[in-house]
Amino acid sequence: MFFSAYTTFTLILFLIWVLLYITQHQVRREMLILGILALFLLPLTFTVQAGDAVLTQKLFESLSLFDLLLSFSLAGIAGVAYHVFFGKHYHLLPSFSSKRNPKNSMAQFWVLRIFITLLVFVWLTLFFSVAFSFSTALAMLFSAIILALYIVGHRHDLLVDCLGSGLLTGLLTLSVAGFAGALFHTPIDIAFLAQTNYILGVPAELIIWSFALGLLLGPLYEFIRSRELQ
């Protein structure tokens, strides 16, 4: 059956992504970059969850277009949720408006820096999963907290962005997944996330995963590109 609670949930998120992409011109590049880079994270979450080569192979074989679409859509939304919801606009930090030429800055290589940050995020997730036997979602949450603390430690103005993005992404996931589950009278079933506990019929691991993405991706673009939200 093509339509299910999971596919409906994913399609609604993708439609939200499309709506934001069409209406929010300022964040189009950010949404695309974060979404594309997030596609590299999903297979690694399989590695975290599986723990052995046979199960990892099975999980890779079960990878569907909707799994990729979910990762792409949710990452793009998580990166701009706070910006869009509160109507914020990007402004260069004062240090870049001086005689210093921003083209000579490391900000010029922002895509590479975002990729490296997400790579560190993946390896931290692997570490927490292997060292402490955390679930995929919980390992991603702890990894996101560590990187978010690093970001906020250097940019105190991004604290509200971190928390707001995490909460908004988590609430959006809870709302859409709850609606899709109620529509089909069945809970969301996601192959790459363990589902042991539920909140209002939505897997807690899915909400934790969404919150972790918002916590990290929300302030990441502003931090890497030396932008502030006003």
Image: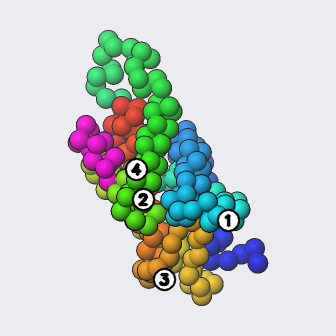
Q: Quadrant of the C terminus?
A: top left
Q: Which residue, as the protein is rendered here, is positioned at the far bottom?
A: 185
Seen from the viewer's position, the closer of residues 93 and 66 is 66
Return the residue at label 2. Answer: 130
In magenta stretch: residue 151: yes
Q: What residue do we see at 45% from left, 54% from top?
A: 126
Is there a contact, CB below 8 Å, between mark 2 and mark 3?
no
Q: Which residue is mark 1?
A: 58
Q: CA distance from mark 4 to mark 2?
A: 10 Å
Q: Secondary structure at mark 1?
A: helix
Label 3 or label 1, whichever lies nearer to me, is 1
Note whether residue 91 is visible: no
Question: Callout 2, which amino acid?
Answer: Val
Kindly identify the amino acid type of the residue bearing the numbered disc 3. Gly
Q: Earlier in the sequence, mark 2 or mark 3?
A: 2
Q: Is residue 47 visible?
A: yes
Of the residues shown, which amino acid type is indicated by label 4? Leu
Q: CA distance from mark 2 to mark 3?
A: 29 Å
Quadrant in which the N terminus appears? bottom right
Dot 4 alpha-carbon crowd within 10 angstroms: few under 14, some 14 to 19, many 20 or more:
some
Q: Which mark is residue 192?
A: none
- Residue 20 in percent (x, y) is at 55, 52
Secondary structure mostly seen in the magenta stretch: helix
**Separation of marks 4 and 3 at Cα, in angstroms:** 29 Å
Is residue 175 shown above or below 125?
below
Q: Which residue is labeled 4 in the image?
A: 124
Residue 201: mark? 3
